[in-house]
Amino acid sequence: MSKALVVGEIKNEQISKVTLEMASRAKELKMDVSVIFFGAGAENAAKSNLSGVARSLFHESSDYNGEVIAEAVSKVVKSGNYEIILIPHTWMGRDISGRIGALLDSSVISDIVDLQNEGGKLIARKPVYAGKAYVKLAHKSGVKIFSVRPNVFAVTQNKTEPSSETPEKIEADYSKAKAKRVEFKSSQGAKIGLTEASIIISGGRGVKGPEYFPVLQELADMLGAALGASRATVDAGWIDHSHQVGQTGKTVSPILYIAVGISGAIQHLAGMGSSKYIVAINKDPEAPIFKVSTYGIVDDLFNIVPPLKNEIKALKG
Ligand SMILES: Cc1cc2nc3c(=O)[nH]c(=O)nc-3n(C[C@H](O)[C@H](O)[C@H](O)COP(=O)(O)OP(=O)(O)OC[C@H]3O[C@@H](n4cnc5c(N)ncnc54)[C@H](O)[C@@H]3O)c2cc1C
């Protein structure tokens, strides 16, 4: 059984969904899985057993430093003879995966959307050319490091009851780091993180102005969704850049992506093309978004969004 280390992520002191997704996929691929956590809440995260996990490791710290985390993970990988590392493709993963690759003299296959065992070889699938094509990649040698896009794997390994095993505390030396975080400012943007959201409602230039984004936010709140936007609306100053989806914004992969008044330019599709179900509301039947959408509504969005909200309100009682 191959030994895999999942680098877990904590959000608001909770284990993030992508961590469970990575652990689930690793178990499905019959790996011997360990999980390591850093940050505030790391100890608690390590104590809550992810069913079937061999080892839980943690370093509790209110500080964040990618250099330090990469160093600590590399040490654990070397001492534990891990063959595979799974890292979430989030801002933390982007920060640490390359560093870990360098420290272990190995390469990272980043932003993967699938991982299969084909004849004993781990084959990853990832989008290229702004989502226009996919490549399959495998490591030739070294520790196999993958960064995994959130929401692409199902959660089958849930958090269960507290672990009977004692989680292992690991050391991390912050004193030698060449850079340190001097301030942490949370963005005023999304209430629910776009990159991990299961449902996203996104607005485009078709919404006509900034005043319609609060309307979409209400709809998003009703569905427990995150609010996204096209670059055209961000450039127009209608909404903050933290909401932008696409090549120069965030890459998202929700179960449901509702595009409201978005044309579906290739740069937008690059950020949301791997969504499971895409629903497009656009008055132009020729809009490119319909080529990728699962369901399309050809109509004026101002005729569709209000009754949609009413229907959801009624359904929710
Ligand atoms: C290097 C580069 C990077 C880029 N990065 C990104 C990126 O990260 N994200 C991104 O989104 N874009 C990006 N773009 C811009 C991209 O090319 C498009 O210009 C942008 O996505 C268009 O946004 P939009 O769909 O909101 O606007 P438009 O293309 O103007 O489309 C508006 C749509 O709304 C529909 N509409 C209008 N009124 C209504 C109505 N009342 N009811 C229903 N439908 C209506 C129209 O039919 C139209 O299809 C990038 C471009 C470049 C060159």
Image (cartoon, rainbow, N blue to C red):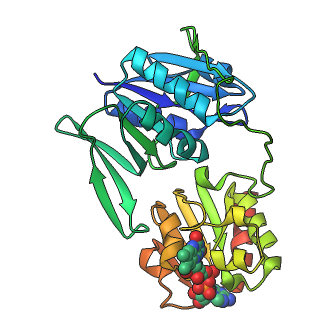
The answer to whether residue 282 shows anywhere in this view is no
- Rendering coords of residue 313 (x, y %): 75, 63
Which one is nearer the viewer's eye here, 151 or 64? 64
Question: How far across and down, in percent of the image, does residue 65 sit?
Answer: 66, 34
> In the current view of this chain or complex, which residue is farthest to the left?
119
Find residue 130 and report its image quarter.
bottom left
Residue placed at 52% from the left, 65% from the top? Answer: 271
| Closest to the observer, 220 or 288 | 288
Q: Residue at x 56, y 65 (%)?
A: 257
Regarding residue 309, the answer to whether it shows in the image is yes
Q: Is residue 15 above or below residue 33?
A: below
Q: How many marks?
A: 0
Percent x, y for residue 107?
Answer: 36, 41
In the depicted view, which residue is nearer to us: 280 or 99?
Answer: 99
The x, y position of residue 194, in whole percent, is 64, 56
Q: Residue at x 59, y 42 (%)?
A: 92
**Rendering quadrant holding ligand 1:** bottom right
Q: Using the rendered view, name the quadrant where residue 1 is placed.
A: top left
Which residue is at 50% across, 90% downward?
Answer: 285
Q: Quadrant of the C terminus?
A: bottom right
- 45 vs 108, left or right, is right
Q: Is residue 167 above or below residue 261?
A: above
Left or right, 144 with respect to 49, comes to left
Nearest the camera: 140 or 7? Answer: 140
Is residue 288 shown above or below 133?
below
Tell me: residue 112, above or below residue 84. below
